[in-house]
């Protein structure tokens, strides 16, 4: 068996794993990234999903020196308009400082490709792809992961292997889980009306519908990403309808915002669920991103919460290295947990409760939402605080 020694081993070559490798490689530590799939494969081109990057995440990417690589692929979000059932109940969010933007929309594939380009320049990073994990062993001094003929020995293991984490299952870290009866219908499409860099969140009685402005490929049409939560049967049936009927159904909801739909690029349905680990660490192990938590997409904060994990991880490991500490000891791992867990748990609860509130059709809850929307939209201080929280600043 071939033994490979490294300081940190990262499991998972998705967006969070790649970002983690990029951030930690700046610390002059030996980093090894391992993934069961083909990280460098062109198959990721089939992933049409988009990500809304918050301003706080953008500032972190600037610190890492990679924002300039992302920015050319992004469409800015200058305004977010939120409606409850109809346009008379509204909240308009803009950057309270009147500078910068609320966020940026970019395709996942663009983020992944730019991260891979950056990682290929790192001399202290090694990547093993098509290398599925088989076993994890941890002792007082090291953690070891096994795959085929490889035994990788490290001081610290970072789990970035997604919602269905092999690492979490193997180690047995407990989680809280919630499965929703709704699914998200997701599609990217071109349309005639200029989106003017406005994102929309429309709370319908069946579930929230979000519209995110995307970068256009030409000057004659505009592109938008739509995420619509509905009871699972409706979402799945909508994805199977012919394009003419699908266009008609969607234009009934969004025509005033997008104008006529010209062409659908991609369509997919995702079942909705959420989870959070009871703790974000174990013996010589730290969880980041979806291996630690996943949220209802109602606030579009899932990716940005993972970015905050990576930022907190970088701060934790930097402090440990500077102090000459063993990177995998409980004090270091728990320090990361203390930075990340509370905020993740709060967002897990907030998104879950918001979903329940906006699906509730009772007269009492309808009155509460109406009063709340009016009060927030008229109260600049509260609106600004909500905006800054969503921006991650």
Image (cartoon, rainbow, N blue to C red):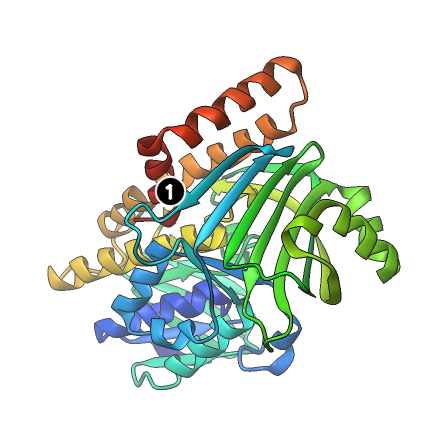
Mark 1 Cα within 10 Å, few/some/many (few <14, many 20+)?
Answer: some
In this rendering, position of residue 391 left or right of residue 136: left
Q: Is residue 85 above or below residue 267?
A: above
The answer to whether residue 4 of the structure is visible from this angle is: yes
Q: Is residue 229 above or below residue 316?
A: above
Name which residue lies at 25% across and 73% down: 26
Residue topped by disc 1: 387
Q: Residue furthest left?
A: 323
Near-viewer residue (273 or 389): 389
In this rendering, position of residue 162 left or right of residue 42: left
Name which residue lies at 56% across and 56% down: 212
Residue 179, x across and y down, in percent: 65, 38
Mark count:
1
Residue 154, x across and y down, in percent: 33, 68
The answer to whether residue 285 of the structure is visible from this angle is: no
Residue 392, x across and y down, in percent: 34, 48
Near-viewer residue (24 or 217): 217
Residue 18, x across and y down, in percent: 43, 70
Near-viewer residue (309 or 101): 101
Near-viewer residue (300 or 316): 300
Res 54 → quadrant? bottom left
Res 66 → quadrant? bottom left
Name which residue lies at 67% across and 17% down: 362
Name which residue lies at 31% across and 45% down: 96
Q: Disc 1 on helix, strand or loop?
A: helix
């Amino acid at each position: 068996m071939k033994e490979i020694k490294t300081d940190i081993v990262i499991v998972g070559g998705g967006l969070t794993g790649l970002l983690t490798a990029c951030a930690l490689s700046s610390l002059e530590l030996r980093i090894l990234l391992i993934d069961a799939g083909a990280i460098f494969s062109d198959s990721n081109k089939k992933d049409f999903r988009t990500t809304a990057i918050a301003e706080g995440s953008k500032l972190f990417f600037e610190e890492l020196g990679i924002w300039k690589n992302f920015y050319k692929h992004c469409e800015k979000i200058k305004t977010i308009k939120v409606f409850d059932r109809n346009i008379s109940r509204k909240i308009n969010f803009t950057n309270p400082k009147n500078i910068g933007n609320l966020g940026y929309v970019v395709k996942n594939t663009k983020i992944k490709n730019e991260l891979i380009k950056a990682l290929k320049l790192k001399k202290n990073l090694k990547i093993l792809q098509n290398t599925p994990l088989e076993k994890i062993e941890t002792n007082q001094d090291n953690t070891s992961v096994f795959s085929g003929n490889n035994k990788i020995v490290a001081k610290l293991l970072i789990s970035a292997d997604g919602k269905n984490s092999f690492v979490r299952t193997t180690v047995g870290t407990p989680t809280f889980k919630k499965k929703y009866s709704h699914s998200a219908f997701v599609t990217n499409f071109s349309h005639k009306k200029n989106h003017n860099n406005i994102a929309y969140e429309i709370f319908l009685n069946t579930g929230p519908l979000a519209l995110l402005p995307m970068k256009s490929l030409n000057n004659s049409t505009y592109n938008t990403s739509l995420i619509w939560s509905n009871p699972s049967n409706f979402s799945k049936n909508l994805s199977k309808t012919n394009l003419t009927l699908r266009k008609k159904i969607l234009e009934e909801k969004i025509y005033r915002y997008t104008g006529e739909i010209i062409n659908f690029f991609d369509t997919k349905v995702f079942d909705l669920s959420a989870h959070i680990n009871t703790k974000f660490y174990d013996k010589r192990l730290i969880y980041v991103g979806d291996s630690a938590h996943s949220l209802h997409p109602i606030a579009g904060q899932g990716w940005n919460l993972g970015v905050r994990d990576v930022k907190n991880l970088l701060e934790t490991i930097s402090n440990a290295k500077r102090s000459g500490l063993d990177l995998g000891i409980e004090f270091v791992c728990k320090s990361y947990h203390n930075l990340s867990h509370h905020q993740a748990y709060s967002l897990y609860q907030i998104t879950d409760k918001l979903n329940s509130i906006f699906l509730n059709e009772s007269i009492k809850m309808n009155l509460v939402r109406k009063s709340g929307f009016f009060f927030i939209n008229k109260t600049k201080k509260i609106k600004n605080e909500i905006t800054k929280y969503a921006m991650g600043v």
